[in-house]
Image: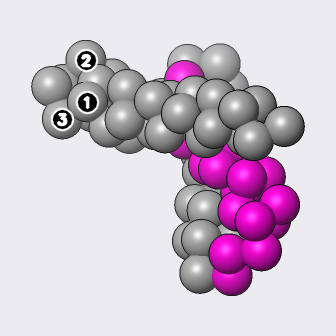
Amino acid sequence: MQLFDQLVSLVGAALILVAYLALQRGWMPRESRLYNALNFVGSGLLTYVAVKDRRMGFIILEAAWALLSLPGMLRRTRASAQ
């Protein structure tokens, strides 16, 4: 089971880093649903591993990251609202 947790954490970290790279390179705006979805899923996976390992600091960090990504993911874009 430890290998599974390592894989989950690697995928979670990769998703967050891909979103950050895309933001920094100008490939994706911070308002993008995809950007927020990558952050949400990535931090959700890392939260899962942190809860399993009982790492309170990481639980707080990753859960907050996921919750802060949620509004941007659910927000309607101006184009779709019209």
Q: Is there a contact, CB below 8 Å, between mark 3 and mark 1?
A: yes
Tell me the quarter of the picture where residue 30 sits. Answer: top left
Is 22 in front, or is 77? 22
Residue on which disc 2 sits: 27
Q: Is residue 40 at least partly visible in the picture?
A: no
Tell me the amino acid under the disc marked 3: Gln
Q: Is there a contact, CB below 8 Å, between mark 3 and mark 2?
A: no
Mark 3 and mark 1: Cα distance apart in space:
5 Å
Residue on which disc 1 sits: 21
Tell me the amino acid under the disc marked 2: Trp
Considering the numbered disc 3 on the image, is that residue within a helix, a strand or a loop?
A: helix
Other-residue count near label 3 (Cα within 10 Å), few / some / many at <14 / 14–19 / ≥20: few
Residue at coordinates 57% horizontally, 28% vertically from top-left?
11
Other-residue count near label 1 (Cα within 10 Å), few / some / many at <14 / 14–19 / ≥20: few
Tell me the quarter of the picture where residue 3 sits. Answer: top right
Q: Position of residue 81 (x, y in %)?
A: 68, 26
As drawn, 20 above or below 46: above
Mark 3 and mark 2: Cα distance apart in space:
8 Å
Residue on which disc 3 sits: 24
Residue at coordinates 65% horizontally, 19% vertically from top-left?
80
Mark 1 and mark 2: Cα distance apart in space:
8 Å
Residue at coordinates 49% horizontally, 39% vertically from top-left?
13
As drawn, 77 above or below 56: above
Name the dominant secondary structure of the magenta segment. helix
